[in-house]
Amino acid sequence: MARIIEGEWDYIVCGAGTAGCLMANRLSANPKNRVLLLEAGTKDDWIWFHIPVGYLFAINNPRADWMFRTEAEPGLNGRSLIYPRGKVMGGSSAINAMITMRGQSADYDHWRQLGLTGWGWDDVKPVFRKLEDHFLGDSEHHGTGGEWRVEAPRVRWDLLDRVREAAVQMGVRPLDDFNTGDNEGTAYFHVNQKKGLRWSSARGFIKPVIDERDNLDLLSGVLVEKVIVENGRATGVQFRQGGESRIARCRGEVVLTAGSIGSTQILELSGIGHGDVLQRHGIPVVKEKPGVGGNLQDHLQIRAIYKVQGIKTLNETYHNLFKRGLMGLEYLIRRTGPLTMAPSQLGIFTRSDPGQERANIQFHIQPLSLDKFGDPLHRFPAVTVAPCNLRPTSRGSIHIRSADPADKPVIAPNYLATDEDRKVAADSLRVTRRLMSQPALAPYRPEEYLPGPVIGDDAESLAKAAGDIGTTIFHPVGTAKMGLASDPMAVVDERLRVIGIDGLRVADASVMPTITSGNTNTPTLMIAEKGARMILEDARG
C-alpha cells in the first residue's frame, strides 16, 4: 500500500523539464502557495550538461537520456530510431540543440483559427518577449530581464559562411533573426547559452530560487505512477521513490509537464485515455479520452552529407589530437570555439516547391558529419545539410507498453505515411542538391556522400532515400492536444485543463494541436508560461 507523505500541497508539478521548471518557479513565486516538483531524472551535476558540445556525449547515454526507441517504422523502410529525452533536471533542454526558435506567426494564428482563444501570434509574442534575456536588447521582437538567456553563437566556420552565400545565390534572403514571425531566409541560429555555457530550464528557473523558497519542494529520482482522481477531481499524485510507493496530496491542481512522452504515460497510467489501450493493460478507465497518445507529430530530418575539400570542418579537427587540445584550451580561456557549438549553427528556411504558401522546410547545416547521434565523427572533411518538413501531415502515437510506469512506451511516429510528406521529402532533397551546386561552394568540390549520387532525381527514388537516411530531431508534440470540448480527440481545453477532470492540467509540448515551424523548446516554455498564468488567474477567481 502506498504511504501518504506528510503535508498537503497547493500545486504538484510532475516533470522538471523545460516546462516544469518554469511552472514550478511561477507557481511558487507567491510564498502562500506550497508547490511540490517531481522529477524522475537526476541532478544536472555532470560536466557535459553544461559544456554546449556535451550533447555529443549525452544523447544515447543512459546517464543523461531515457534511451527510448521508436518501433520499426514502415516509412523509414523498417528502421527503428533512437528517441532521446533528457533524464535530468531541465529535461531535454539539458541535452538539446540549444536553438532559440519560436516558429512562424502563422503557426499560432492557425491555433486561434481552430477556436483556441488566446493562442494567436499577437497573444503569444508578448509571452515570448517576457521570458527572454536577449543579447539584441529590448525591441519590438525581443525582451530583456527574463530568465531565458539568448546569445549569438561563439564560433564561426568559413564553410558555413559559404553555404549561406550559396543559399542567397539560390534566391533565399539573408536574415539576422529568425524570431520575428516570418523565418523564411538564412541566418545563424541564436542559442540558449550564457557566456559559453548551456542555459537549460533548470539553470534559468529552478536553481536561482530553490534554496530561497521554503514553499518549493523538489524531489528527484521519483517516478510518477498515477494521478489520483476522486469524484472527478485530481486530488494527489502517487509516485515511486526508492522502491516504495508514496502519495502526495494536493488541494489545488496537479500539473503535468513531463512532455509528449511522459505526460501521455501519466495520463494513461491514471486511467485517462483510450479505453481500449487502458483495458488492454488492466487499468480501470477513469475518463475515456481517445485522443491521449494520438496526434503525435515530429520533425523528420533528412541528413544529407557532402564531402568537401580545401576548407576546415570539425571532422578532421576533432581527430587531430593537437587541434583537439587547442579547442579545449580556447574554451578554457575564452569560452569560445567549437566546444560552444550547438549541433547546428546555420539555418535555412525555404519552400520545397514554389506552390508552398510559406517556408515549409528547415535546413540545419553542420560543419561535421557522423552516421548518427552517439556515433563518432567521420574521418573525412564533410558538411551535413539536413532539411526537415516543418509541418508534416503524418500522425503517429505514443502509448504505454504495460501498467508498469518503468516500462518504456510504444513510440510510433509514422513518418512519411502520407503522399504529401513523401513529396516534400523528395522535393527537399532536390533543394539540397541545388544548394550544394551553387557557385559559392564550387571551390570546395562538394561530393554527395548521402544519400549518394547513385540515387536518381525521380520522386520515388528520393522518397525511398529519405526513408533510408531520415532521422528524428527530437521534436515530439501533440499527444494531449488542445482543442474545443466538441472535438472528441481533444485532451485539454484552451486553458490547458484536462477536459472532464477537475484540478488537472497539462502544460507542455504535448498540448500543441499542430507542430510549430521550427525547434520546439522555446514554444514549450511559452506554453508553460501561459499555463502558469491561467492557473494563478483561475485560483484568484
Image: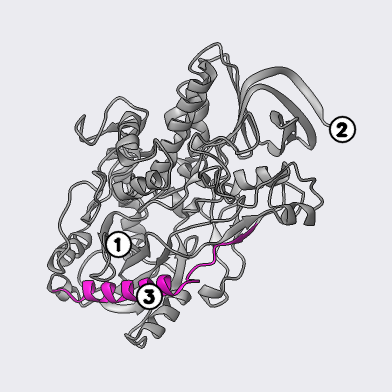
Nearer the observer: mark 1 or 2; the answer is: 2
Span highlighted in magenta in the image: 410-438
For the residues bearing labels 1 and 2, Cβ distance under 8 angstroms:
no
Res. 1 mark:
2
In depth, the one of 472 and 359 nearer the eye is 359
Res. 367 mark:
1
Give percent across and percent down for residue 249: 72, 23
Which residue position holds label 3? Answer: 423
For the residues bearing labels 1 and 3, Cβ distance under 8 angstroms:
no
Check the image and report above or below for 370 versus 131: below
The N terminus sits in image quarter: top right
Label 1: few (<14), some (14–19) or many (≥20) C-alpha neighbours in 10 Å? many
Give percent across and percent down for residue 444: 19, 73
Q: Residue at x 35, y 66 (%)?
A: 386
Estimate the spatial distance between the alpha carbons at disc 3 and disc 2, rounded to whole Å.
54 Å
Give percent across and percent down for residue 70: 59, 63
**Labels in figure, total:** 3
